[in-house]
Image (cartoon, rainbow, N blue to C red):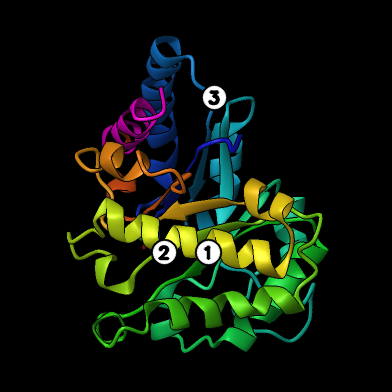
């Protein structure tokens, strides 16, 4: 049984002063929900790296976990502007998002670069969320599975066996556009990812690995998307900036599981 995971990617949004009020509002929403649903799930917030200390302090002794939006490919060294995975661990930040489409497309991070970051994260015992997904022209050209398969391919060169990783399927055409994949489109790719993991690793690894959907998730569509058997939660951008919307996504997503 895979625990639903609801992850927030704040990207480069919010002031540090907004972190505490957000966490308080989210906790309130989640408390009400836990009392109502009694369902088990995990929540992770990835604020900008500059906000991680504040987020850590604001979420201590709460069920909210924190994550980084990227990490460097080495523990330390001459890597201007990068964030050390060792320091993330030291800060009490267990999660890291890797290979997000904005990193791949705006900052030209290729599969090899993402692999280096993944290897460094795993070495420090961080929990990576590896993002994969096709662009609109790639989908139109019928290349969705080929692109996803190529992006997943880096896992064969990372020591993932026996470790916990999460895959986020985020079609690039659905990120921040208001146009989400249909539940059937999401399920088709999630099922492909799960069977790829089974073929290249093991049935047990495939069964335990959570596959999140990301791309214009909101409270109005989370129940539909999560009713699919291979959708184990979400990676949410825009709608995660508002505590009420994010807890609404969690609440409606879990409804389809109860
Ligand atoms: C994202 O950036 O990971 C994302 C899914 O964004 P949004 O929810 O805004 O589409």
Assign the C terminus to one quadrant of the image. Answer: top left
Q: Is mark 1 within 8 Å of ligand 1?
A: no
The residues tagged by marks 1 and 2 sit, at their Cα atoms, a distance apart of 6 Å
Q: Which residue is mark 3?
A: 40
User: Does 146 sit left or right of 86 as displayed?
Assistant: left
Percent x, y of residue 233: 45, 44
Q: Residue at x 26, y 66 (%)?
A: 174
Nearer-the-camera pick, 13 or 98: 98
Q: Nearer the viewer, mark 2 or mark 3?
A: 2
The answer to whether any part of residue 69 appears in the image is no
Q: Which residue is mark 2?
A: 189
User: Does 173 sit left or right of 102 as displayed?
Assistant: left
- Contact between marks 1 and 2 (CB within 8 A): the answer is yes
Nearer-the-camera pick, 122 or 204: 204
Q: Which residue is mark 1?
A: 193
Q: Residue at x 45, y 85 (%)?
A: 107
- Image quadrant of residue 223? top left
Q: Secondary structure at mark 1?
A: helix
| Most distant residue in the top direction | 35
The residues tagged by marks 2 and 3 sit, at their Cα atoms, a distance apart of 25 Å
Percent x, y of residue 168: 48, 60
- Contact between marks 3 and 1 (CB within 8 A): the answer is no
Q: Which residues are magenta?
A: 244-258
Nearer-the-camera pick, 236 or 26: 236
Q: Residue at x 60, y 47 (%)?
A: 53
The residues tagged by marks 3 and 1 sit, at their Cα atoms, a distance apart of 24 Å
Which mark is drawn over residue 57? none
Disc 2 packing (10 Å; few <14; some 14–19; many ≥20): many
Assign the N terminus to one quadrant of the image. Answer: top right
Q: Residue at x 54, y 42 (%)?
A: 55
């Amino acid at each position: 049984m895979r625990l639903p995971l609801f992850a927030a990617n704040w990207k480069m949004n919010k002031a540090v002063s907004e972190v505490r009020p957000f966490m308080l509002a989210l906790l309130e929403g989640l408390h009400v929900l836990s009392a109502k649903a009694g369902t088990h799930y995990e929540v992770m917030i990835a604020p900008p790296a500059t906000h991680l200390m504040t987020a850590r302090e604001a979420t201590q002794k709460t069920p909210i976990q924190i994550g980084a939006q990227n990490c460097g490919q080495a523990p330390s060294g001459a890597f201007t502007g990068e964030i050390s995975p060792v320091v993330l661990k030291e800060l009490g930040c267990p999660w890291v998002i890797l290979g997000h489409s904005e990193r791949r497309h705006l900052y030209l991070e290729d599969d090899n670069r993402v692999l280096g970051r993944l290897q460094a994260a795993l070495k420090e015992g961080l929990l990576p969320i590896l993002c994969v997904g096709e662009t609109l022209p790639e989908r139109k050209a019928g290349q969705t599975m080929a692109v996803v398969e190529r992006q997943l391919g880096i896992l064969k060169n990372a020591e993932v066996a026996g470790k916990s990783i999460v895959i986020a399927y985020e079609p690039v055409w659905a990120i921040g556009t208001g146009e989400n994949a249909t539940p059937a489109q999401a399920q088709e790719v999630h099922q492909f990812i799960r069977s790829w993991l089974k073929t290249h690793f093991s049935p047990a690894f495939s069964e335990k690995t959570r596959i999140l959907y990301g791309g214009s998730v909101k409270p109005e569509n989370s129940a539909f998307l999560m009713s699919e058997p291979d959708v184990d939660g979400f990676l949410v951008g825009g709608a995660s900036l508002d505590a009420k919307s994010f807890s609404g996504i969690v609440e409606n997503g879990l409804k389809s599981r109860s």
